[in-house]
Amino acid sequence: MNGEIDWLELYKAWHQKQTDYFSAQKALDEAMSAYLAAQGPPPSRQVMKRVEDLRHHMFEARGAMDAFIADHAADQQEKHNLPRHE
């Protein structure tokens, strides 16, 4: 059960970071489109840095999920405590 809790926490963290990144990236894209259409100022470097940081955090969270999956992926003969899915 602890593995299930860990997985759920990893998944929720990744999903939240993904949502945050995509939202910020969309806002940045819209700001740049408005600027190119002469309808607003260019995006600030701070906004661009924030989007970059969110992207980095999203990929870190995905890496943690991938590591969890890799840690639990093995032959059934090696891990007798895992349920069989036949």
Image (cartoon, grey):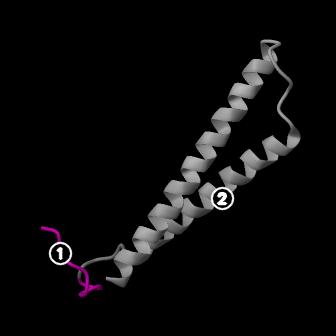
Residue 8 vs 37, above or below: the answer is below
Which residue in the protein does label 2 denote?
57
The numbered dot on residue 16 is none
Of the numbered discs 2 and 1, the one sitting upstream in the chain is 2
Residue positioned most to the left: 86
Q: Quadrant of the N terminus?
A: bottom left
Which residue is drawn at the image coordinates 69% and 26% (left, top)?
30
Q: Is residue 52 magenta?
A: no
Give me the C-alpha separation between circle 2 and circle 1. 34 Å
Which residue in the protein does label 1 denote?
84
Specify whether residue 69 is in view: no
Which residue is drawn at the image coordinates 76% and 25% (left, top)?
32
Residue 26 vs 2, above or below: the answer is above
Which residue is drawn at the image coordinates 79% and 41% (left, top)?
48
**Residue 69 drawn at (x, y percent):** 42, 69
Give the residues in magenta.
77-86
Q: Amino acid at mark 1?
A: Arg
Q: Main secondary structure of the magenta part?
A: loop
Left or right position of 81 against 55: left
Left or right position of 59 against 67: right
- Which of the 4 quarters of the picture holds residue 58? bottom right
Residue 72 vs 23, above or below: the answer is below
